[in-house]
Amino acid sequence: MKCYSRLAACLLLIGLASILTAQAQSSGQQKLTKRVVADYVSAAQFITPPYNASKIPYHKLTHIIHAGVPWGSDGSLSVPDGFIEPALFKKAHAAGVKVMLLTGGDFTIIEDNPAMLNTVVSNLQAFVTAHGYDGIDVDWEYPQSPLERATMVQLMTAIRASLPAPAYTLSIDVAPWVLYGYNFDKLKTVLDFFNIMVYDCAGPWTAHAQLNSPIFWDWHNQAPGECKPGASDEEAITLMSKHLPLEQINLGTPFYGYEYTNVTAPFQECPNAPTTPDGECDDAVNTWVYKNLKPLINQQGWKTYYDPIALVPYMLRADGSPGYITYDDAFSTYARVYYADWTRGIGGTFMWALDQDYDGHSQDLMDAMYHASLQPK
C-alpha cells in the first residue's frame, strides 16, 4: 500500500508541475527566491555550437560556478587557455549573479604539509581577487579516510580565512554515498552551501543498466548496492538533512545521460559484466548530452518511456533490439527541482553543465529549472 501511496503522490506532483510550468511561462521574468546554481565549463566556448558568456541566461541564475582551475603537485594553478572571459563577470554582476571558481587538484600534497596548504590557498586567493570572483567551489571526489576528512576541514577553513564571509561564497561538491568523508559539524560553519551530486548512478562502472538520476528510488531495481545509499533525490535529501540545515543544501540535476548498448530494458544486467575483472559494463556505455539526445526522442528508431516511480525518462529501441538511454528531459528536470525546492524545502539546485542542453537556439532544461525554482503562487 505504501508503494501505491507514493506513486499517487508522484502522479499528483506531475499534474502540479504541469500547471505551474504553464503559469510560470506566462508570467515573464520573476525574481528567484531559491538558489539556481550553474556549472559553466570554460571549454564550452570551443565546442559546436559554441557556448560562452554571451549565451548565459543570467536572469535565470543566482550563482555561476566557473569550471575549472586545478592546482598541481607544487601548489600552482593550471589555468586553461581562454579561461578568463571578462564579459562573464561584467554580465553576471550586472544581473546580481555571483561567479565562483571551481577548483580541485592534488589533495595529497596538502594532507601532511601545512606549507603546501598555505601555498594552494594563497594562490587561490590571489587568482580570485585578481579576476573578480565572488567565491570558490571545491570539487574533491571524494575524501574518505580520516586523514582526508580532516584535510577537507583544514583546507576549507583556510580558504574561508583568506576569503571571508559575507564578501565571498564558499561551497563544496558532495556525493551522498560517501558522507563519512565529511565533517559536516565543522564544515557547515565555514561553508555557505553544499552541492549534492545525485547523478552518475549510471555509467560504465555499474553492472546493471541504471537510471542516471532517479527522483525516487524504483524498488524494481534489483541492484541496490550500486550508487547507494542516497541513490535518489528523495533519499539523498533525507540523508543530507540529518547533517545540514535544509537551507545549505543544493541538489544537482544532470543535463546529460548514458546509453547502454547491450541491454533492452532498465535495471537489466550488462551481458559482459560477469566476465569483466570488476563486474562492470565497461565499454558498453556511451555518454550523451541533452542537446544531442533531443533528435532521438521518439525518432530515429528510439522510443521514450517514463519510469512511473523514479519520474525520469529513458529510451529503448523501438524494434526491441539492444539499446537503452537514461537521461533527463524538461519535464523530469522541472519535477526534480520543484520537488527539491518546494516539497522538501532545500536551499536550491544546480546543474552539470550549463551548455549541455544548448542546441544553438534554446535551453529546454535550463528553462524548466528556472520555472520550477520560482515561488509557487
Image (cartoon, rainbow, N blue to C red):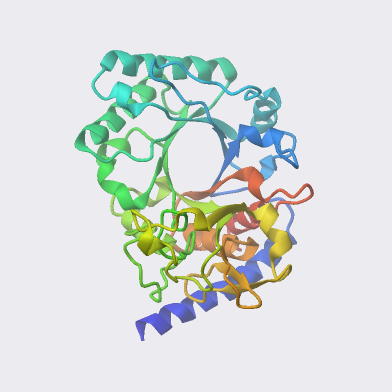
96 on left or right of 358: left
Image location (x, y in percent) of residue 265: 51, 73
Image location (x, y in percent) of residue 14: 57, 73
Image location (x, y in percent) of residue 133: 55, 25
Q: Quadrant of the N terminus?
A: bottom left
**Residue nearest the observer in this picture, 17 or 272:** 272
Determine if residue 95 is in view. Answer: no
Q: Residue at x 53, y 27 (%)?
A: 134
The image quarter containing residue 238 is: bottom left
**Residue nearest the observer in this picture, 130 or 84:** 84
Spot the residue most to the front: 275
Q: Quadrant of the C terminus?
A: bottom right
Determine if residue 297 is in view. Answer: yes
**Residue nearest the observer in this picture, 184 or 52:** 52
Can you say whether 154 is above or below 17 in the image? above
Can you say whether 164 is above or below 357 in the image? above
Across the whole image, how many numbered discs are drawn on residues?
Answer: 0
Image location (x, y in percent) of residue 89: 65, 27
Spot the residue most to the left: 146
Q: Residue at x 38, y 23 (%)?
A: 159
215 on left or right of 54: left
Spot the residue most to the right: 361
